[in-house]
Image (spheres, rainbow, N blue to C red):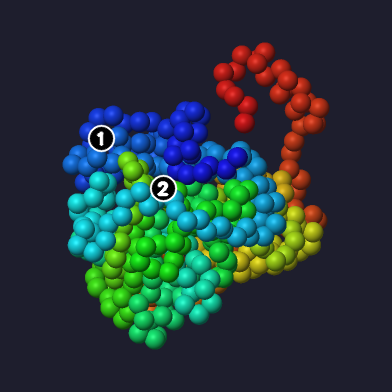
Amino acid sequence: MPYKDLREFLARLEKEGELRKIKVEIDPEYELSAICRRAVDAHAPALLFEKVKGYSAPIIANLIATRKRFALALETTIERTTEKWINALRKGPTEPVIVKDGPCKENILTSDEINLFELPWAIPKWHEKDGGPYITAPCVISKDPETGWRNVGIYRMMVRDKRSTGFQLTPFRHMYISKSKAEAKGSRFPVAVAIGVDPVIWICAAAPFAYGVDEIAMAGTLRGEPVELVKCETIPVEVPASAEIVLEGEVIPNVYKPEGPFGEFHGYYGGLYNREVFEIKAITYRNNPIYHASFTGVGTENHILFSMSMQAEIIRTCSLPGLKNINILEDGVSMIAIAQIEKKFEGAANWVASAILGCEAARMIKYLVIVDEDINPFNMKEVLWAIATRTQPHRDIFILPNTPGTSLDPSIQGDFNRKFGLISKMVIDATKKPKEEFPEVPDVPQEIKRLVEKRWTEYGIDVQLA
């Protein structure tokens, strides 16, 4: 059965030993961030901070910071995550249902009642040089003003003052495209922000679906039941009825104000840029709300969200046969990928590589390594061995210049390239070359391998078999 809300998922995590409740008081300025960072490095469970200095609401962080918790969100195992993703989404989108009311309406603030600095929950300040407190786990919901298509994405939000925040948008992001249509007419662009939702909605908000796909409808398919939505109080947008917190507002047309710096997902500070202004018209929230915050940095929740959904979506949408599996490395901040292919003919590696990089889901990939079926793309020892022994740089590496990536890549130079996220991409063909040119891999008979595996504990070697 799907989780009806964030609270049911937390109960499941606690049952699985994947949740720790922090009962001592913590400061939301920097202390929470430092705890989250150490917990991520230690592969610790999700953290529920029950006592936040100066606030009554608890904060949940590192919610889906491991592959196991990603799989639990989809009610499956790590090994079967991609299979479930592909099989479920073959059915197509499941349209949400509109309900009259929901828990997210239990408290409603409008006009002069709105003050982002005086709410039951804290909006943490994550890093010393950040431009301000940041909302880092928002499901930002909008509709195309011409087609009515609903989009849900994750766009970090810097708090500017008591009633407004910034958005970090770039020209290739889907919300930017819809926002630009309203802006061209001088119209305000309605946006709702849901914080603390069913984890499948959160995952779909991060997933690299193609333009025009409704993430809420895809979440309905993945969870096996349509998502229940409720109409906002002040704007023509619908939000998950069971969300913990909802911010309703509008992006002001042709108004841009400084936003940043911010400690980005890639492990460096991002710069100070002029960004859109989001003016809040209403805030609704549940009784005793739980605030969902996502710590950013290398190896954090962002990379699990990106990597796991990218892997599944690339396999689902790759236009050519031959791709067997793909591993998006979260330690490579989702910019490095290892693809395993069935190589039936020479040239297949570059052909499939081009198809992978042509997927919208693969936009963030900067380095792509192609390996044979005998190499496990999730075993870096095998991958590095293949690169070392099956490649010649002059023959097996090619580079694609001026290709869309992420504008947050700190290695980009030039304002034009940064604005459009233009990067170069490298493919390494680490597959075996024609048999007559390549030696056999030494091995022992399979029956001896099976014998050793069967007798392993008899040998007294205190190491688990891989």
Q: Which residue is drawn at 40% across and 42% down?
A: 62
Q: In this view, does 230 lie to the left or right of 123?
A: right
Can you see residue 99?
yes
Instruction: Give the SS element for disc 2.
Output: helix
Q: Measured from the top left, where is residue 406 in percent x and y?
A: 44, 66
Can you see residue 310?
no
Q: Which residue is drawn at 51% across and 67% down?
A: 150
Q: Name the residue under label 1.
A: 51
Identity, as a three-letter code, of the amino acid under mark 1 = Lys
Q: How crowded is mark 1: few (under 14 residues within 10 Å), some or many (20 or more)?
A: some
N-terminal-most mark, 1 or 2: 1
Of residues 343 and 291, which is closer to you in this image? 291
Q: Is residue 255 above or below residue 361?
A: below
Of residues 92 and 339, which is closer to you in this image? 92
The quadrant of the rendering that contains the C terminus is: top right
Q: Mark 2 points at which residue?
A: 103
The quadrant of the rendering that contains the N terminus is: top right
Q: Measured from the top left, where is residue 270 in percent x and y?
A: 31, 62
